[in-house]
Image (spheres, grey):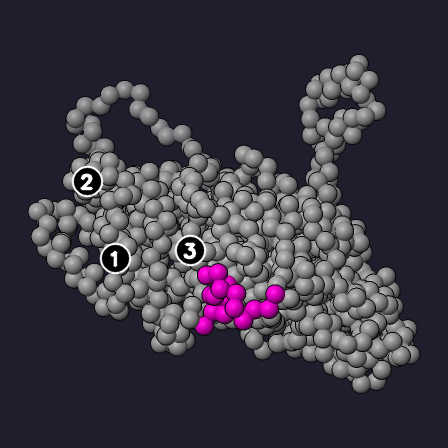
Amino acid sequence: MSTNPNNLQSTANQMRRNNADLTGENAATPAATGLNPSIPPVPSTAPIPPSVTQSTTPVTSQTPNPIVPIPSRPKNPAAAKAPTGSASHTATTKPANQPSTIPKHSLSLDEVAANVEKQRQVTKQSKEIAAILGAKTIDVEKAYAEKTIAAKAARKREADRDEETALILEKHSRQTQKATRSGPTCSTDLRQVSHSTNTTHASRTERTATSSRSEDRKEEHGLRAAQTSTGVMRTLMTTSDAALTYHAEKHPKTDDNSTEKGLRYTGLPYPSEWCMSYSDWSLNYAEFTTTMRDVYKYKTLGEWIVLHKANADKILRKDGFMVALRYDIRIRANAFAHRVVKNGVKSFSDISIFRQEVYDTAYAEARSYDELVFREVNPYAIGGVRASWDPHTGSKSTTKSTASNPTSNHHTKNTNPQTQSGSQGPSHLPAKPRESLRGSGYQGKNYNPNHSSIQSHSSGRYHNSKKDGEWEAALANTNLMSEFEDVLRGFKEGFHQGIPAQPKIEESISKEIKAGRMFGPYTTEQVHKKFGFFQTNPLGAVVNGDGSLRAINDLSFPHGKEGIPSVNSFVNKEDFDTTWDDFKAVAKFLRNRTKTALLAIFDWEKAYRQIPTAPSQWPYLMLQNFKGEIIVDTRIAFGGVAGCGSFGRPADAWKHIMLAEFDLVTVFRWVDDNLFVKELSSTVEMDDIVARSNELGVKTNPTKISPFRLEQKYIGFIWNAAEKTVRLPEEKTQARIKQIQEILTKGEEYTYKQIEIMTGRLNHVSYMLPQLRCYLCSLYRMMNEWVHRHVPRPLPLDARQDMLYWLKTLLTFDRTRLIANPEPTEIGWVGDASTSYGIGVLIGKRWAQFKVRPGWNEGTLPRLGIAWMETAAIRIGLLMMKGLDIRKGKTIIVWTDNTTSEDAVKSRKSKDLHVNEEWKRIQDILLEMQIDLVAKRVTSKENKADGLSRGDRRNHLLKNQVVIDLPSDLEGLMFQASSLD
């Protein structure tokens, strides 16, 4: 077939144009210029950033950075977002959806064959021309064939998985029906768990023998196939290892106070426990046991873990993996969320004991969610049949995707066109992320995700003019114009969202420059000439309590991007330790004081901004203003990992200078807040301290200085050095009451962040009310079990009950409390009980004896028992101490020989219904008396109150007997014995 030279020339020209288009696109991408995407070419004049309150890509010099990988070219180069703070280029694209030529008449077979042959020749010639021009060619037929083969293979694998799942469901349907009929009672043999370290191996042997006797090998194969998705497991384990490694390196030392101060884990997200397959679960337990027992030398805890795993294995063999997993997670979540106190020392609860009620709950949930058919498979694991389901509800997640078209709903405006490499293009605003990342800079009520340097993008109206007229007429006719005039103005001009205005941010930067803490502004050329390599970071703004703005230099940007390191990622926080003086330090000091002292407050003004940084650090601490100019920051930045320690060292030195030069007792420091303590006879005044601090260059906030007096507010509490009391400010108490009432609104759901904030606030109050710490366990447990943190959840029943107790206490408690003494006090308090006689209580030499009435343990089930009597003995002891005038603020030791009563004091609750109700009454008395308890164990043989509980009052003088008025609930069950009894 002959070739038309005109067609050939036309084809060659088209290929050249295509190649030129590709070259233009590559020139607009970092890959074509050979530069790192985070290090764009330096324009002659830097462009205006979209906002200083949003995350922007750092502006740097032309020095390449080989660490950062170059991303692939976007599918739509014209719509791609250029890095903020650098010049961008418009990529050449072709119109989408070009109409294809469709024949208007049918062809004969000969004509079709001729056209096919012609097309092959044209394709061959096009390849030859492309080779000459150096353009890339693709074998479409080969690519299509490969794609078809891959698609068929994928469909085949999917069909195989569906068949295996169907077989599993069919084989286990009868077992499911049987399990549904039998209910939780079918597993009562779980109480007989062998406490042996070899139980785990025995469980595996039994499970293997059972599998080998299976009648259907295909079912066994299906189960194995479902649990051994190797790619998924490798991904999960890799993520887990990375998260744990990062957490170990970046773990803050102040975890106990982390919620109060906003410190939190900001590493890779932890993989959810609910996503563990059976093999993951087994391997993780082996590592967990080895780490606790062999690495950290917690021998007892290691044994408990082995026994707890044996309990879970027995549940697995009996009821399936999901029942075992639910039991395991509940037990561990409770253990880690709730620290028990033994002999005044925080300890770990015994997880080796089988908990029947937890098992019953786990079994009921698994049965309700149809999970019993999954014997050794986790359907919620990655790639499982319920991977997108919520394991808390056993149903599909109802959340909607927040993904949106990145090119829609965003204003794109070229506010400062730049010329570079002969190309010109707009500076695109970055799309708002679907979900904000923790620690991603300022995210408060004034957060601005897409702020432009121009206040108004256009003069266009935000509402239809005809509708505006309707609104105006309606408001006028109903005489509501004066009240809702702002609504009409909002429709016409747009509603203000409270975003900080640009002038405020510019004013803040201007003040820093005027104070000599920042220098500039400079052009990028000037900075590059001076420093060579440099980097700018996103600038955020936090609104302070007085309405002023605090600049945040986001040194953690970019967040979560592999291969693009942030400034903070190079800093080891452990190298910047400092000292802290928290609630316990102040309480212990004032409690042990024998003389009255005077207190004063000194506050560093803009504490971090008073500490200079080394010039070698300046290239990494630069900012960019609204005009695209570079600002050099020479002070410690809010948002830097090293900031706290860098400030802490000179602050510690200043503190010791003050102690050495002035007549002071001590100084407590919490970041920039300082509590000065002096004797009544000391003549030093705060004016002297301020004057000396000014000589050292330490500036203070005049509005936050408080002269020496008996009472001061420090770390959120008001301390009285004369009366040795501490109280919560009235406004803070009312705020907590209102917040709890909002949480208790029925039918509402709450986000993880809301519950975390509420827990942190109440944890702060618990420093003053340690008796209420046990009522935070349900909130910690709720957060521990939260799988998808972006999905709101209702408040569980136990958390609601705890919040009600918090509300009742905050409404009624005495807001002024004596500073508690954390050291337990021994007063010789021991109690005992016997069902044959009654209760005996001994406090030193003082004693009391009570005889039970006939029929005291009769009535509805469950009946009162010895555990309740032993706990009631503790309440009677507290009532005796009311008459003995025990000093407030003490922690008293009570001795008991009953395990249930001892656990009730330690855990602040009990599984025994009557004991738990008795403990609630004890808790009310503790709050009223402002004391706390620590339970210790005594053997029955050594219990000095044993004789009293059996009716023997020998060796106890009558003058030492304490007579009390029994509460009405106890008076109907017992009476105080006399000598005749």
Q: Position of residue 199 (x, y in %)?
A: 23, 64
Q: Position of residue 378 (x, y in %)?
A: 29, 49
Please report whichever mark, 3 or 1, sits nearer to the chain's N-terminal start. Answer: 1
Please report whichever mark, 3 or 2, sits nearer to the chain's N-terminal start. Answer: 2
Q: Residues within 10 Å of mark 1 (few under 14, many from 20)?
A: few
- Quadrant of the image occupied by residue 63: bottom right
Tell me how far mark 1 sits from mark 2, CA to CA: 24 Å
* Label 1 vs label 2, nearer the camera: 1
Q: Position of residue 292 (x, y in %)?
A: 38, 71
What amino acid does circle 1 point to?
A: Gln
Residue closest to the far bottom: 660
Q: Is residue 953 magenta?
A: yes
472 left or right of 129 in image:
right
Q: Is residue 68 depicted above or below 357 in this figure?
A: below
3 and 2 marks in contact (CB < 8 Å): no
Please report whichever mark, 1 or 2, sits nearer to the chain's N-terminal start. Answer: 2
Q: Which residue is mark 3?
A: 836
Q: Is residue 101 magenta?
A: no
Q: Main secondary structure of the magenta part?
A: loop
316 left or right of 348 in image:
left
Label 3 residue SS:
loop
- Quadrant of the image occupied by residue 959: bottom right
Q: Residue at x 72, y 71 (%)?
A: 591
In depth, the one of 317 and 941 nearer the eye is: 941
* Label 3 vs label 2, nearer the camera: 3
* Label 3 vs label 1, nearer the camera: 3
Q: Residue at x 43, y 33 (%)?
A: 97
Q: Give, as a single range, the part of the protein colored magenta.
A: 942-958
Q: Which residue is mark 2?
A: 175
Q: Is residue 272 visible?
A: no
Quadrant where the N terminus is found in the figure: top left
